[in-house]
Amino acid sequence: MLVGFFCAPVAATENESPWEEFVREAYSHSPELRAAHARWQASVARPAQALSLPDPTVSYGYFVQRMETRQRFSIQQMIPGGGRRGLEAEAAIQAAHGVEAELEATAARVRTEVLKALADWHLVRQNHALIAQNLDLVVSLEAVATQRYRAGETSQADVLRLQSEADMLRADLAEWEDRRIPILARLNARLGRPADAPADAALETLAALPPLPVSASSPDFASLINANPALRESHHLVRQAEFQREISRRASRPDFMVGLELMDNRGMARDEVAGMVGVNLPIWRTRTAALRREANANLQAAEHNYTARRLSLEADARQLLFALSAANRRIQLYDDTLIPRARRTLDLIEGDYRTNRASFLDLLEARRTLLALEQAALNVRVERFGLGAEWEQLAGPFFVHSTTTPSPDE
């Protein structure tokens, strides 16, 4: 698999959503993602180390007392037996695949966090706009109430209540304006920007929530979860533990040594060259038995972790699907029934109020009801968008490749 997706600037794709442009920026600048990529690069370098022979040993000896042999040179090479080098390399490859899957999981998580931060930013801006619209409405109603009060058609209490309502809306506007600061700081952190970096033009003109490709039908959960990078990471850790267990089983097999020795006789006799072979004696059964017990326990732990993660992912998938269905039902209820009905009610009561056929309290309550429903619908839309982003993260990695970095076994 190719994973060097942020080593170079990632090119924008045709008709790319402005939301995805921020994700692309995060892939290029996220410190968390760069750290994960560095860990993957380190893991890719380990199989070659495991497959390599140990460094040869060169030694020199000098005889202090005068003898025929005055000095000697030797070189020795240890060769691990039992095929352990190949097994250690395979274990390192599985570990590297696991780190690669961790990198993909990090990329998917960064994407989700960026999209959620953008959705919160959208929520702030839209709530600000809704409250501003309602403030304009209240101000216009205040003008009507003032005229009616001057004409003796209503009491001053109505005017004062509308003025208080306008003041409360202005306070809400200021609060939503202040909420921009922590949300922008969180988004900047995901994008690799300073926390106090100002919002750029692309952020200030961010479009409406984009659709996320979430299937409405019940999916094949087993196939869905198999693509999850976190589960693939657990799978590779199991495979690594299997190779480690096999290595422990071969720990009792001896290592071999080959070498050459040159003896310098200082001209008193012909120099001599001797070949050497050796073998270690793995006779300490207590140590090798402990190695096997440790490897077996590590394998059991990896298998249980894999099972636990798979069960957890399936439960998360079912919960997400339920939450998405519930959010869709609520949005349909708001859009098709509650909000149109509240708007119609407000229009009728406002007309009746202008002709003195409805009370001020009826008008105020209708206006508050409509605002509450519009804000609730907006919250549910943002919630559904966040759930959709989590669903995509669960289903697999979503990032753009920009460079071709080879996998560990290439």
Image (tube, helix red, strand yellow):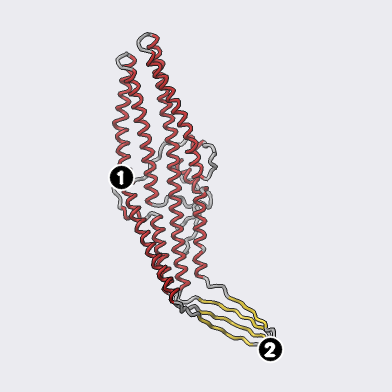
Q: Which residue is mark 1?
A: 322
Q: Quadrant of residue 389?
A: top left
The residue shown at (47%, 52%) is 401
Q: Looking at the picture, how far across and down is residue 156, in whole percent?
A: 39, 13
- Horizontally, residue 12 falls left or right of residue 227, namely right
- Residue at the extreme front: 286
Look at the picture and state if 312 lies above or below 274. above
Residue 114 at x, y percent in the picture: 45, 44
Residue, x 49% and y 38% (percent of image)? 184
Q: Amino acid at mark 1?
A: Phe
Q: Quadrant of the N terminus?
A: bottom left
- Residue furthest to the top in view is 151
| Residue 68 to residue 180: above or below | below
Judge whether residue 15 can be spotted in this image: no
x and y, in percent, of residue 194 in the image? 55, 42
Marker disc for residue 67: 2
